[in-house]
Image: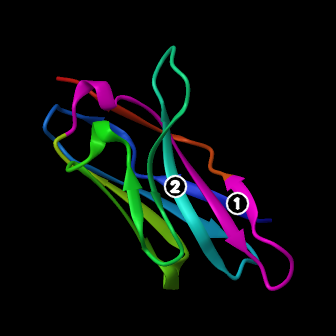
Amino acid sequence: QVQLVESGGGLVQPGGSLRLSCAASGSIFRIYTGGWYRQAPGKQRELVAAITSGGSTNYADSVKGRFTISRDNAKNTVYLQMNSLKPEDTGDYYCNANLNFLSGPPRNYWGQGTQVTVSS
């Protein structure tokens, strides 16, 4: 069964750091493109950061300079390093990825979400 498994969320004080991981498991060839979304209480899900197959990245304006998305192709894992965290970064973070298989087009998957709470 193909799935994206997230980890690394938790409670952190303002100014602190967390690193989220998103590992693709199952019979996949590789992660083609990956991204992290977040959903704050009472708000719509929004794109936080994305990375292409070639390693190009883009970020929401609210996290530029503080968050870094990266990938480890050997581990089929996408990371989100979050520094200088603010209370407004609180929310459920979801990994989304287009996965390549040995045949057929890429398919899109979502992770189950991991909670990030920034509070003193």
Where residue 5 sits in the image (x, y, percent)?
A: 59, 57
Q: Which mark is residue 19?
A: none
Name the image quarter holding residue 72. Answer: bottom left
Q: Amino acid at mark 1?
A: Gln
97 above or below 39?
below
In which quadrant of the rendered image does the C terminus lie?
Answer: top left
Tell me which segment is drawn in magenta: 85-109
Q: Quadrant of residue 15?
A: top left
Question: In the image, is residue 86 part of the stretch drawn in magenta?
Answer: yes
Front-most of residues 16 and 58: 58
Dividing the image into 4 quarters, which one contains the N terminus? bottom right
Q: Nearer the viewer, residue 11 or 89?
A: 89
Left or right: 53 as drawn, with respect to 17: right
With 46 as the anchor, is 26 left or right in this view?
right
Within the magenta stretch, is there residue 20? no
Count of numbered badges drawn on the protein: 2
Residue under label 2, please give it. 35
> Answer yes or no: do the residues labelled 1 and 2 have beta carbons within 8 Å?
no
Check the image and name the residue furthest to the left.
15
Which residue appears at 73% of the width and 57% of the height? 108
Q: Residues within 10 Å of mark 1 (few under 14, many from 20)?
A: some
